[in-house]
Image (cartoon, helix red, strand yellow):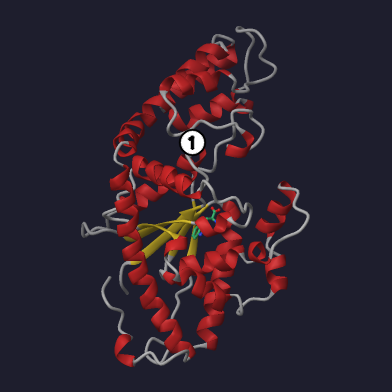
């Protein structure tokens, strides 16, 4: 068996926030840089900008390009290395649309209507009706994953049902269309849930999200972070500085848990409980620790921000590599389905 491939992606919503970092990006970088005992890379990694998926919830496309670049710069700032991981937009590799079409015949609409992630989204966004394409969200995602024959898909909890649908589609395809040489065209991918889940928002109510305006951005300066931290909701029972607090219900402590050293965290916890630590002081420390963690990202972001030519070149290079892998897979798909007259000599995948 060859090297295992990891693929993940995000919808381009613009600049990323801390929740994207702890919930996904940090893990992507780790997988990208992981070595096996022999010192070789443990995984091949590919990351996609799911711009078509954006259309499921908004037809507004005016900012899709700038949002994609902003997101890409945050990926690079976080340590994604384009030499190791092709980075590409779904819309620029036409094979996504092609495989999506074929896959949409391999799954029933009632199966898609049962998708819990979709049901949640419809409820959260108060949607009255659903487009055909939105119902097919996980089918497009299946094409994203299977075009690159990914074995592992790092995702948040809410995306597990989509990877399950991907597995079902892979199975269906393999049974229906065995390949004359390969047998099965697709391997069934496994989801890999990120260990540190998304952060709660500054309002303490829900997870960090751009639409709720409760985020700290990866591109925020130390001053921005401190300013935002001032509005963070803490233990509502701790009114005066010397009231004893309850770190377990405090938003700021949930950030300390991630960004503060274990030693400092345990002394802060003790002081808060004893009423020796005021929230203002506690927030300052938290803001400082977050800013420290983000300092190298900010520096790399500044590097790329003034070199947009380089950023677009990275994208075009990634799209070239992605296209090569995707078109090899489509060759196999068409051969297995006896669509067209692909000569058998093209079957061995050409190197990408
Ligand atoms: N649906 C994913 C999300 O919202 C984004 C995505 C699109 C994706 N295609 C993918 C994730 C393929 C993993 C693999 O988070």
User: Is there any visible trace of residue 177 in the rendered image?
Assistant: yes
Classify residue 159 as left or right of residue 95: right
Picture coordinates of residue 107 (x, y %)?
63, 76
* 158, 332: nearer the viewer: 332
Q: Residue at x 60, y 63 (%)?
A: 137
Q: Is residue 241 above or below residue 199?
A: above
Q: Is residue 163 above or below residue 30?
A: below
User: Is there any visible trace of residue 207 in the rendered image?
Assistant: no
Q: Residue at x 28, y 55 (%)?
A: 84
Q: Residue at x 55, y 66 (%)?
A: 140
Q: Is residue 179 above or below residue 92?
A: below
Packing grade of label 1 (10 A; few <14, some 14-19, many >=20) is many
Picture coordinates of residue 206 (x, y %)?
65, 36
- Please tell me in which quadrant of the rendered image residue 208 appears: top right
Q: Secondary structure at mark 1?
A: helix
Picture coordinates of residue 270 (x, y %)?
53, 17
Q: Which residue is mark 1?
A: 18
Q: Residue at x 42, y 25 (%)?
A: 221
* 314, 278: nearer the viewer: 314
Picture coordinates of residue 102 (x, y %)?
55, 78
Classify residue 196 as left or right of residue 291: right
- Judged from this view, the residue extending furthest toward the front is 62
Q: Quadrant of the N terminus?
A: bottom left
Q: Is residue 47 above or below residue 168?
A: above
Q: Quadrant of the C terminus?
A: bottom left
């Amino acid at each position: 068996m060859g090297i295992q491939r990891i693929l993940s992606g995000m919808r381009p919503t613009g600049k990323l926030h801390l929740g994207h970092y702890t919930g996904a990006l940090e893990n992507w970088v780790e997988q990208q840089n992981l070595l096996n005992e022999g010192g070789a890379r443990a995984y091949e990694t590919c990351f996609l900008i799911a711009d078509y998926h954006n259309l499921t919830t908004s037809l507004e496309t005016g900012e899709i390009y700038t949002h994609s670049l902003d997101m890409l710069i945050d990926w690079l700032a976080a340590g994604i290395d384009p030499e190791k991981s092709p980075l590409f937009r779904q819309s620029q590799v036409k094979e996504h649309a092609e495989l999506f079409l074929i896959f949409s015949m391999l799954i029933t609409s009632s199966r898609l209507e049962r998708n819990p992630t979709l049901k949640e989204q419809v409820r959260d966004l108060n949607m009255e009706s659903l487009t055909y394409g939105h119902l097919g969200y996980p089918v497009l995602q299946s094409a994203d994953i299977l075009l690159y024959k990914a074995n592992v898909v790092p995702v948040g909890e809410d995306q597990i049902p989509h990877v399950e649908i991907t597995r079902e589609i892979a199975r269906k395809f393999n049974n229906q269309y065995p390949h004359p040489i390969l047998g099965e065209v697709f391997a069934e991918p496994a989801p890999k849930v990120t260990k540190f889940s998304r952060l709660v928002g500054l309002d303490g109510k829900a997870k960090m999200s751009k639409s709720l305006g409760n985020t700290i951005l990866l591109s925020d300066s130390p001053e921005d972070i401190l300013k935002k931290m001032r509005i963070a909701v803490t233990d509502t029972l701790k009114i005066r500085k010397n009231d004893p607090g309850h770190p377990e219900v405090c938003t700021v402590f949930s950030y300390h848990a991630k960004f503060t050293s274990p030693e400092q965290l345990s002394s802060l916890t003790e002081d808060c409980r004893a009423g020796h630590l005021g929230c203002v002081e506690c927030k300052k420390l938290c803001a400082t620790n977050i800013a420290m963690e983000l300092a190298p990202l900010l520096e790399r972001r500044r590097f790329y921000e003034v070199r947009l030519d380089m950023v677009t070149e990275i994208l075009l290079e990634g799209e070239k590599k992605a296209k090569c892998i995707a078109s090899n897979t489509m060759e196999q798909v068409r051969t297995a389905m006896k669509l067209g007259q692909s000569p058998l000599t093209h079957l061995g995948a050409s190197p990408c």
